Image (cartoon, rainbow, N blue to C red):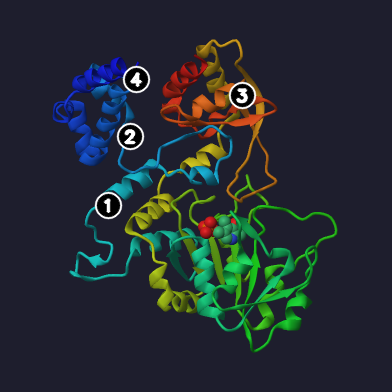
Amino acid sequence: MREPAREVEVDRRREVPRTDAVLADPRLQAAAERLGRDPVKAAVRVAQQQVRTGELAPAEVADAAVAALPATAGGLRPVLNATGVVLHTNLGRAALSSAAVDAMVAASGHTDVELDLDTGKRARRGRTALAALAAAVPRAEAVHVVNNGAAALVLAATALAAGREIIVSRGEMVEIGDGFRLPDLLESTGARLREVGTTNRTSPADYAAVVGPATGFILKVHPSNFVVRGFTSAAEIPQLTGLGVPVVADIGSGLLAPDPLLPGEPDAASTLRAGADLVIASGDKLLGGPQAGLLLGTSALVERLRRHPLARALRVDKLTLAALQATVAGPVPPTWQALRYDLDELRDRTTRLCRRLGLAGAEVIPSVAVVGGGGAPELQLPSWSLSLPSTYAEPLRHADPPVVGRVDQGRLLLDLRCVPPSADEPLLRAILAAGR
Ligand SMILES: *Cc1c(COP(=O)(O)O)cnc(C)c1O
């Protein structure tokens, strides 16, 4: 029984096309330019091995290698976010505007990030992005940008309270996700937390009672991913400003000015007007920009943070600065297009898709979308979704591009508000293919 099997194997080995012959395929040459030679060779080797095991015909090696190669060398795959969660943490929070993408591409080579082309001298890093941010929040005397909101907190705690105390309400000891807790983050800087009040109630007098020479600052944290209801009270910023120590407000989501759609979300301008000395926020939540930590406040505090040695370890890339400026000063980013999506238009678009699918198990139903990403936890945005049998979920995640929806009561819901209309065709093809 062994002999014939080995013969077949030997024959197949002879049939395996030579690597250099396969690599001469123009599609694979183009892929090598795009991705580098190694991943292309690796894909060819996998396909050759499939010929040896009889899974693939020898003539199909190049096709199989082409099909297995990704579109870009970046590794991260673009995904269609049909979850109805606008800022989905697992999908990278905010999607950038094309203006921000263009700005990043323009900044990706050598750029004047720290050079004044008029004088030929060194200039403030990212000065135009900082100026755009400052212009968007005129209340802020000065602004600074670091890697993310957590980095902004660490910089403030280190520069203003290392070896001293940060006063914070027990109702604001927040876990921000993936097991990371703000109290742990703050204490990792060498600052001590001075907890005041209770989970549900904290008064201005609670803060006043513990302010002293050891105080670095009072921290107000916006509980951006939960709400406490019932017998509750909290000290507001204007009630804390007279205590002789800085008030730092972590507003979380990065709204720069109040927005009627999100009445419960704090914004940087109002928080500064209320008397906060320093406001901390994320760049990739409701601002709709790149991952970044925004620091806005008095010149004295911002300058202390900017000159602290740790600031150098938290500084942002030129790509971030470019995308941030294009977000703050440029056209409305996808986050806000999704939040303000016209309901009739969304229903019509979803209905058109449903009709074209012509699937017995597909229908358009009212649904609910949310902000997500630790913002506006209570807000329910009325929405429309394409409802499909839940068996579509897995094949759609493996489509190209992958489509991620939300399974609800045994149905897969696809909400198009975060799917660019230009993706309707690939989405249609992906759903039809998933049904086969
Ligand atoms: C999201 C959030 C953070 C962390 O910001 P990142 O940009 O994710 O690092 C900190 N504080 C609050 C209140 C938040 O909502």
The residue tagged with tag 2: helix, strand or loop?
loop
In this figure, which residue is indicated by the disc labeled 1? 108
Spatial CA distance of label 2 from label 4 is: 21 Å
Amino acid beneath label 2: Pro
Vertical order, 186 against 261 (above or below): below
The residue tagged with tag 3: helix, strand or loop?
helix
**Where residue 173 appears, x then y in whole percent?**
68, 65
Q: Disc 1 beta carbon < 8 A from ligand 1? A: no
If you read the primary sequence from the N terminus, does the residue marked by circle 2 or circle 4 appear first?
4
Residue at 48% over, 60% down: 148
Of tags 4 and 3, the one toward the viewer is 4
Of tags 1 and 2, the one toward the viewer is 2
**Where residue 39 appears, x then y in whole percent?**
27, 39
- 215 relative position to 426: left or right: right
Ligand 1 shows up in which quadrant of the image? bottom right
**Where residue 95 appears, x then y in whole percent?**
46, 43
Spatial CA distance of label 1 from label 3 is: 41 Å
In this figure, which residue is indicated by the disc labeled 2? 70
Q: Disc 2 beta carbon < 8 A from ligand 1? A: no
